[in-house]
Image: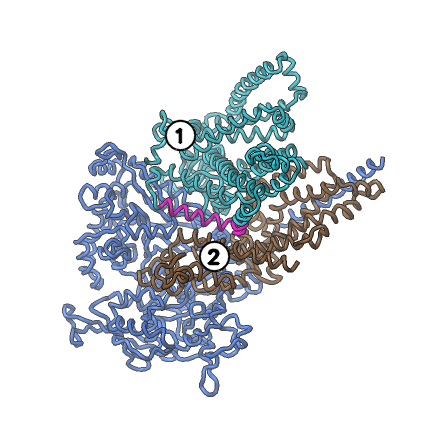
Amino acid sequence: MWNSPHHIDLLAKNVLFSSFSSPPKHLDPVISYNENEWVFNSQVYEPLLQYSYFNIPYQLEPLTLSKMPTITFLDSSNNETKNSADTSYTRYSFKIKENIYYQPHPAFAMNMKGNYIFHNLIEQDIKKIKTPTDFNTKATRKLKVDDYIYAIKRMAIKQNNSPILASMKPLIIGLESYSRKVSKAFDLKEDYRLKNYTISGVKKISATEFTILVKGVYPQFIYWLSMNFFAPIPWEAIAFYDQQILKEKNISLDTYPVGTGAYLLAENNPNKQIRLLANPNYNHGFYPSTGLSKDADQSLLDDAGKPLPFIKEVIYSLEKESVPAWNKFLQGFYDASGVSSGSFDQAISLNAGNMSLTEQMKDKDISFISVIEPSIFYFGFNMADEVVGGYSVKQQKLRQALSIAINYEEYISIFLNGRGVAAQSPIPQGIFGNLSGEQGVNTFVYDWKNNHTQRKSIATAKQLLAEAGFENGIDKDGKPLVLNFDTPLTGPDSKAILNWFRKQFKKLNIELIIRATDYNRFQDKVRTAQVQMFSWGWNADYPDPENFLFLLAGVNAPINTSGAGVNGANYDNPQFNKMFKQVKQMKSSPARQQLINKMVEIVREDAPWAFGFYPKELALKHSWYKNVWANPLANNTLKYKKINAEQRMQAIKVWNKPITWPLWLLLFFSIFAIYPLIKAYKNKQQKVIK
Amino acid sequence: MDISQISEVNGISLLWTDMMIWGLMIFLIVWGKYISSSLQVQQKWQIFFQSKIAMVSSIVLSYYLIITLLDSIQLSLEGGGTLLDILLNHMLNATERTYSAPFAITEYNKSLVVANDGIASQVYLPLKHVITDTSIVLQSVYALIYSVIIAGVLFFSHLIWLNSKYKASLKQTTLKIIRSESKLPWLTAYITIFMLILFSTWLLQLSNFYHVMGTDKVGEDVLYSVLKSIRTGVLIGLLSTIVTLPLALILGISAGLFRGWVDDIIQYVYTTLNSIPGVLLIASAVLVMHTIMNNNPDWFSSTEERADLRLLFLVLILGLTSWTGLCRLLRAETLKISQINYVSVANAFGVSKLKIITKHIMPNLSHIILITIALDFSGFVLAEAVLSYVGVGVDPTMNSWGNMINQARLEMAREPIVWWSLFSAFFFMFVLLLSANLLSDRVQKVLDPRA
Amino acid sequence: MFAYLIRRVLFAVPILIGVNFITFALFFIVNTPDDMARAQLGAKQNSPELIANWKQKHGYDKPLFLNLDAPSAVEGITDTLFVQQSIKLFVFDFGVSDAGRKISADILERIGPSLAIALPTFIIGIITSISFSLLIVLFRGSTLDSITMMIAVAIMSISGLFYIITGQVLFSKILHWVPISGFSSGWDGFKFIILPVAIGVFAGLGSGIRWYRSIFLEEINQDYVRTAKAKGLSEIKVLFKHVLQNGMLPILTGVVVVIPSLFMGSLIMESFFAIPGLGSYTIDAIASQDFSIVKAMVFLGSVLYILGLILTDISYTFFDPRVRLN
């Protein structure tokens, strides 16, 4: 085996091989807000709650908590109340598990006198140190509720640039004023423990209990608590990492997290590889025994109740290009792989709408898992634009016509190989509020025929276009309609995609001008409402319809927020806005569903988006990779997974036999070529002599 | 005035780059007429074309140039397009659904089909725009016949022209050419031209029935893309070189001639530019260009014009960042020449600088200029592919070999491999660059006084 | 000699200032500091407050070239982004990247992999090119000569991307000879560098052979070679004893200029083969618009280029007794 990109010895061990395509920029949990960072962070840090592995619809369960938080509603004078009308505050009470310990780390190491050994490092101490694991002495400490409170305090420090501070400030009582005070004091002295001020709404009750007071009713708050922003941070780590000589070596909390999770980050070389090791102090996680639906593969529960984690080491290698990563997966050097559109046909064949593996994959005993992601990609119209915007019936009709013309079913089949579902509303499947079947059809774009949706004909679209005042793509002054589409698209596929968009508009005899820009410029144009049409996407932060409907709320339109909002279409419908306010505060219930249905119907008629599609994630895995289940919201699932290294080694050996005959052939020919050369030279010499 | 409305002439409109390439052509013809009046120059070119390789490669280059020029006449007919588009119209309209191999009659991958009785099956879907009720051999014979006719007419008129020039009989001239006794290797030229005509008619003839080079991911004919890419490649090569020339000439000669502070400043400028790694400089300049274009969306009214403007800027950037090499060579050579006696004498007699430049310096620099042009040309064509890979090349909607090769990265990873896009782009690019490089070899041999 | 060196180094200073000026001007037309902040902070977190914080933290809150708010005219020029950041560059303090990592630490770490590709490509490239060109000089004028020259031109006429794409498919995907991409330091890394080096050498063979051949041909036509041949020395002996030795001077002086640039790595090769060197560092920095890295790399590239020029001058004095620097 000449072509192994890994050490051959490691392939035979209980080591998982994976890849990352862009290096994580921030691993500090208070900043990190990127999926490619959470892949690592979530294995190390443990917030209070997690998504349960198998449950669909998505459901939260305690992680470091001993039970789910208790929720109490309080009125304006802090008395408990049952009546939601007078609720002024909501109190969340938490009780964490006993005996959870941090990973071994030099920051905790103390000498006999009880002083921290490594908090005052000098040059000599760290000559040979490349990562925190290289320190010879490491120690641990028990998890305290103070660490959770400390994390919230750190989030409040403006200088830390926490992305959720702005949304948390109005929510958590006292956070705003604390943030002001502590941010001012932050530069003055090094108060590592942040003991000087307290947040009035966050209270420590005992060594294992604390409460958070939240303003009003905001049921989605609990989802935030499952994110790494609320993961515990030991103050010792901050004190340890705040040493200049460590920063010089790129060792900081932003590069080496310290947590209680199933894994610890042993090596972080963003240029080459990132390595996780099982945390030896981890003792509180067990494989789940419930939640798996009946029609799923029941062998997933074989390990129920066993202590986690199974895999001892994970090596993530940098793979910027999808092509080599895919080939290495086929050769067995990666245990799992996503499927890019370039490699799709090779792996999957579509059969009556169902995906099945191709023969080549079946031969290798590869299997796949797929799940519709809680995300949406949409084609937005700028409602503030003179041509495509506006709320009059005529203007609605123009957008409806275009929504019919942009055939996303075709897009999905050409560019995504069926890895997506054409969207009927802003709310993706799997999220409360999404309706399936006939109930969920967007009747402005689709008909319901023979038990499935059918896009309305181009003739209908042309009719709508004429009613909108652009008969056959010509306006009333006889000028052809020309529309602009802004896109940050680059890369190998972009030409085909952009041509495809032009084709869609051509169907209505509309000229589409593509304005390709880089991503920065694109964002800038959306923010300043300079785009006419654009396509963009949104990933759910949490599985609640509010997280999607707010993309269309008037309060989030860039024109209303001087560029800060996420509602790039600048959609601002008073009726919708009013209902959005209500939906935001409700718990999921039939009443909420009804309200959402009304909102969705309004949006469909106004058509500020052509709804685009919900992407489907598809992953392939080798037969030796076990306990794999797709849960797009749970990030800390590495601990459940398992490897059969022996089986892997055997497969790789068979698949990667070098083909050597061309080498011998080459050698043979080179030797053969020497003889005539020598002969020719001799001839030449003789000629010269003559 | 709105740029998009410039030069609407009798149903023919020109893009910026069209104007540049036609302007260049007219300049070359006028200049060629002017210098060919000198007997010395004529002799030099005679020697130059005596080499068979030079003959073949200049004919091949002209072939590319003709396609470029055909593709540089925009007709404002319905749907737009160029003269070349009219020739290739059948390919443009013959769009399939997705990949198909050269000469295939079905798609490359199986698709799901639900029959009337509701049974689903995996089949290779037939292509929509393939006509199979004729044989490839028969059509090839047709193509051969056509090309013999076309080539016959061409050669005959050339022979008559030769006759009138040398006042010999038709038979004599023909025999001379066939026996390779003519001054210039006309036989080679004839064979090359015939091969090119045969190649083109064969492709054209068969493309009426098949996708000769297959189709790409969205079903567009690869032959069409690759032919349209010729314009992009040739324009980038030619125009960028033309942009470098005046800068390098003016700065190089003035530095060498005037010396002193002029020389210091010019040396400073090109050393500074040279010391910035090339790709970085070009990439940042291209990003600047994107910004400027985004801030002025009224400069263009269609995707073609936008792509064209991007190409124009790319050409300018390539030119403005690559004049330093030639400038340095010219400076050194000018220094050397101006120290030769007769120049110093002319100087002492008070002959004007301009006269010194045109009479004494320019003629002695021509070989350096020509060799550099030929080398730069292939350098720019190659650079286009690399820049597309880095993401700062021509507009992604434009047909170009760089875009094709870039896409081929994904295609080569497929199983089975989709090889025809890469191969077609490679083939057409290779032939162009090979001819350019061979020609530059010949230029070096004939014109370089040292070689 | 020493005085000459000092002068050359001093001459480098205005050039480096010019280089800095160009990079600053170009980059900030494209990218306002606000853009950079947004790119670094990510799509979901760009409130104006966060952006202002970021700019202050990374020192981008000053005006570009002229500070009109400064108390004095001197400070109006010095208290600007350009001057502040340029001064740091001149003492090779590259600071932190926009993502918060130490650039000098990253550069030091990436030089190794870059050299692991560039150095073998360079050396093997020279050796193979010289051997091939010696061979065809031996058979000069024969069909072997013209065929090789045609092949050399053909090699030059093919885009490097084509070599890389087909090389990867053939040797890694089909024949399983080497890993598709990746890198590891030490002897274990041999299998990773073999393909990029082979491709690099092959792609450079065309121009290499042509250049060396012309040098050797020039030597072989010199009088002393004819004399040597007349004395009855065999062709091979003449080639190695006289032609190669005397050809060394133009070869060395021509080659020295590129040696420092080897440190910069190869942009395309490194990103195709996932080599964590300086070339891919640069490409990534352009893609992610990390200006701190871009300007550090441009500066480094310019310094190395100027170093190459100086080295060339020095090598002339070493190998050619007729040249004296003053």
User: Image quadrant of residue A563?
Assistant: bottom left
Category of crowding for the residue at label 2, using alpha-carbon neighbours closer than 10 angstroms: few (below 14), some (14–19), many (at least 20): many
Rendering coords of residue B361 (x, y %): 60, 36
Residue A452 x %, y %: 28, 45
Secondary structure mostly taken by the magenta-highlighted segment of the chain: helix
Q: Which mark is residue C295?
A: 2
SS for tag 2?
Answer: helix
Under mark 1, the amino acid is: Gln
Q: Tell me how far mark 2 sits from mark 1, CA to CA.
A: 43 Å
Residues marked 2 and 1 touching at CB (< 8 Å) = no
Structural crowding at the residue carrying mark 1, measured as other residues with C-alpha within 10 Å and reported as few (<14), some (14–19) or many (≥20): many
Q: Colour of chain A?
A: blue
| Residue B152 seen anywhere in this rendered image of the structure | yes
Where's the C terminus of chain C, which quadrant?
A: bottom right
Residue A618 magenta:
no
Q: Which mark is residue B74?
A: 1
Which portion, as a residue range, is magenta? B271-294
Q: Quadrant of residue A67?
A: bottom left
On screen, residue A155 versus residue B421, left or right, reads left
Instruction: Tell me the residue at 62%/41% (across/down).
Output: B333
Which residue lies at the image location 68% right of the left edge and 48% below the top edge?
C251
The letter of the cyan chain is: B
